[in-house]
Image (cartoon, helix red, strand yellow):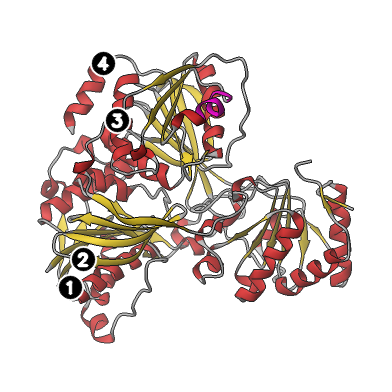
């Protein structure tokens, strides 16, 4: 029987990002929130392992109260329990502090054989939190997984690492970090969607995980964001006209002019 | 965990720039490491401090002359068979020892697979900040936070914003940078102290072990980050058979093939060809995008190309706004016609000459 924790995050759907054309700023209010795409694959991995070996899956998210939405979604996918780690004192945590909070929440929930995360979140794209967890929880972290078999006290994993395929044996407990290359996410069953809103969500605050206020949020974060500006990189766009052959000739003339190709 | 923190606080003042000189495929110095040595040299000169290049490899000696060309004051190296590949248990442990001993103020790490593992582990062990995937590094003085701080710029919010980040209190200030972001420059006449350090690690404590010898996976002939010409394909190419023709074009132009997420996801090519915020950053002389709409995650990684040509059937494709030359055509059809046209000419590719 496996005990599996899966860490998920609610993020803005960055494909829907809109920039205010006048002020050049992000229109955050108009962006819908979704479960981070890599985390869907993390939930899938958890449910796959549960299906094959038996066990329980606990979904954990850290975020504001509305992040409970993705816990309901994870219930619809088939997790067994859900935990919302939420406290206004956690707001503004950088990736290091996020790792600290999640690791303390995970440790506080009991002992897990396997912790699963997405590789990265689309909003921050640091891809660091999994490694922070690996250090805080003292569990090895494995990425780029192609095949996994759980044996008694260890996992045998095939993965692509750099330019090489590796077959490795890893002691449990361990952390798996997964993304869309790992698996295909299931569709929730209608019956599960119907009941997912009624299932209990356990809430954890700073009092539940311990530590003091100065360790968390902005004050606990070693990094400080001192400025944010929108990013614009326009170029002169010259359009090639005419039929396809004429466009090709026009383009070749220009590439020759730049001395990029020559005859 | 906590005592590490105390030790650092009570000790000497942190000084110097340490660079992880990653060895790629156990055969060459990573280009991104040369770039970071160059960048690190510039930062250290601004601060009046030293640069420490760290080489951990099998037969590390053979890389030292190459590393020296980029102007470090010290080259610290360990040579051992255990260091042939990056190892997520051994390397962080060795670096922890080096950081305690040399106490650098700044630590620069390439954002490769190895570096992305190493950096957050060290950040946790030293309770210090990490800024991942930086696109700009500088030294600033701040009235509020103090002097000689590392200013780290990175894309935020999927590349729609640029955030300026500092790490005012804890040390080292850790930044990771994708290969290709900075320029490399040789610095001759710089004296470097070369120091061999004894390697020791108890491998019986490893929790991850290889079951069998690893096997090689296809890779680009020229690393994508260094290619002078990049022809990239996206969703608009429609099918693998169309995407495959990019290889024909890249061969004619002496370049390499890149991709957005969709071709990688569809299995038209390997992950090592993905250009984007989570893939590679390229700055070729010529970038040609076929059937690429221009999601911001992709375009932030091509903006340093000298010339950007984009081909897309959609007149509203966002990539057109960051292109020098715009061709509104079906990407697959244009690609085929361009290849046929180039076949008729005896073409000389001028880049790199």
Q: Earlier in the sequence, mark 1 or mark 2?
A: 1
* Residue designated by label 1: A53
In the rendered structure, which segment of residues is drawn in magenta?
B63-69
Q: Residue at x 23, y 73 (%)?
A: A75
Q: Which residue is drawn at 39% across and 50% down?
A: A127
Name the mark on residue A84.
none
Q: Mark 2 points at which residue?
A: A150
Other residues around mark 3 within 10 Å, as few (<14) / some (14–19) / many (≥20) = some
The Cα–Cα distance between marks 4 and 1, rounded to whole angstroms, is 50 Å
Same-chain status of marks 3 and 4: yes
**Is residue B65 part of the magenta span, yes or no?**
yes
Q: Which mark is residue B11?
A: 4
In what quadrant of the picture does the N terminus of chain B appear?
A: top left
Disc 3 is placed on an element classified as helix
Vertical comparison of B11 with A16: above or below? above
Q: Does the magenta stretch include residue B82?
A: no
Residue B345 visible here: yes
**Callout 4 and callout 1 share a chain:** no
Q: What element carries label 4?
A: loop
* Chain under numbered label 4: B
Q: Mark 3 lies on which chain?
A: B
Q: With A136 as the anchor, is B180 left or right in this view?
A: right
Given contact means CB atoms under 8 Å apart, are the residues at marks 1 and 2 in contact? Answer: yes
Q: Are marks 1 and 2 on the same chain?
A: yes
Instruction: Name the residue tied to disc 3.
Output: B96
- The picture places residue B333, in percent across and down from the top left corner, at 75, 75
* Residues indicated by labels 3 and 2 sit on the same polypeptide chain: no
Task: Between label 2 and label 4, give the one nearer the viewer.
Answer: 2
């Amino acid at each position: 029987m496996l005990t599996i924790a899966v860490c998920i995050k609610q993020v803005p759907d960055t494909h829907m990002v809109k920039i205010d054309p006048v002020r050049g700023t992000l229109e955050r209010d108009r962006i819908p929130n979704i479960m981070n795409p890599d985390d869907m694959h993390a939930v899938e991995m958890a449910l796959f392992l549960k299906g094959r070996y038996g066990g329980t899956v606990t979904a954990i998210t850290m975020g504001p109260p509305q992040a409970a939405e993705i816990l309901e979604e994870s219930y619809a996918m088939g997790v067994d329990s859900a935990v919302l780690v939420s406290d206004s004192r956690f707001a503004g945590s950088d990736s290091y502090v996020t790792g600290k909070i999640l690791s303390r929440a995970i440790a506080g929930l009991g002992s897990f054989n396997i912790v699963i995360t997405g590789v990265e979140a689309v909003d921050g794209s640091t891809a660091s939190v999994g490694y922070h967890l690996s250090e805080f929880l003292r569990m090895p972290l494995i990425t780029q997984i192609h095949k996994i078999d759980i044996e008694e006290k260890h996992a045998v994993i095939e993965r692509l690492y750099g330019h090489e395929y590796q077959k490795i044996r890893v002691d449990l407990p361990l952390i798996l970090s997964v993304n869309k290359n790992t698996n295909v996410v299931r569709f929730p069953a209608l019956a599960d969607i119907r009941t997912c809103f009624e299932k209990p969500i356990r809430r954890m605050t700073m009092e539940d995980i311990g530590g003091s206020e100065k360790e968390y949020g902005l004050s606990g974060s070693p990094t400080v964001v001192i400025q944010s500006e929108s990013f614009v990189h326009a170029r002169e766009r010259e359009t090639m006209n005419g039929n396809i052959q004429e466009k090709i000739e026009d383009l070749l003339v220009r590439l020759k002019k730049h001395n990029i190709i020559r005859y | 965990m906590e005592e590490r923190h105390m030790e650092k606080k009570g000790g000497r003042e942190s000084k110097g720039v340490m660079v992880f000189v990653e060895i790629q495929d156990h055969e060459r110095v990573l280009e991104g490491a040369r770039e970071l040595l160059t960048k690190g040299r510039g930062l250290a000169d601004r601060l009046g401090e030293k640069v420490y290049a760290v080489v951990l490899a099998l037969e590390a000696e053979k890389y030292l002359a190459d590393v020296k060309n980029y102007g470090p004051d010290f080259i610290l190296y360990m040579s051992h068979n255990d260091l042939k590949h990056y190892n997520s248990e051994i390397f962080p442990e060795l670096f922890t020892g080096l950081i305690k001993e040399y106490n650098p103020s700044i630590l620069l790490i390439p954002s490769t697979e190895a570096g992305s593992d190493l950096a957050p582990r060290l950040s946790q062990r030293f309770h210090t900040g990490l800024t991942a995937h930086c696109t700009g590094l500088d030294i600033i003085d701040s009235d509020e936070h103090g002097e000689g701080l590392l200013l780290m710029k990175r894309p935020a919010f999927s590349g729609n914003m640029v955030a300026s980040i500092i790490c005012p209190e804890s040390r080292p200030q850790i930044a990771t940078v994708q290969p290709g972001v900075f320029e490399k420059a040789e610095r001759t006449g710089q004296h470097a102290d070369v120091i061999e350090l004894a390697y020791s690690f108890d491998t019986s404590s490893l929790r991850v072990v290889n079951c069998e010898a690893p096997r090689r996976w296809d890779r680009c002939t020229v690393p994508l980050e260094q290619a002078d010409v990049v022809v990239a394909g996206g969703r608009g190419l429609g099918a693998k058979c169309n995407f495959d023709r990019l290889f024909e074009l890249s061969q004619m132009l002496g370049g390499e093939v890149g991709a957005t997420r969709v071709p990688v996801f569809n299995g038209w090519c390997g992950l090592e060809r993905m250009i984007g915020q989570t893939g590679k950053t390229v700055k070729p002389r010529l970038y040609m995008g076929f059937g690429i709409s221009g999601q911001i995650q992709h375009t932030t990684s091509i903006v340093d190309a000298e010339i950007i040509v984009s081909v897309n059937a959609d007149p509203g494709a966002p990539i057109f706004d960051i292109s020098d030359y715009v061709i509104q055509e079906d990407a697959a059809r244009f690609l085929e016609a361009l290849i046929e046209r180039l076949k008729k000419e005896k073409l000389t590719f001028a880049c790199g000459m």
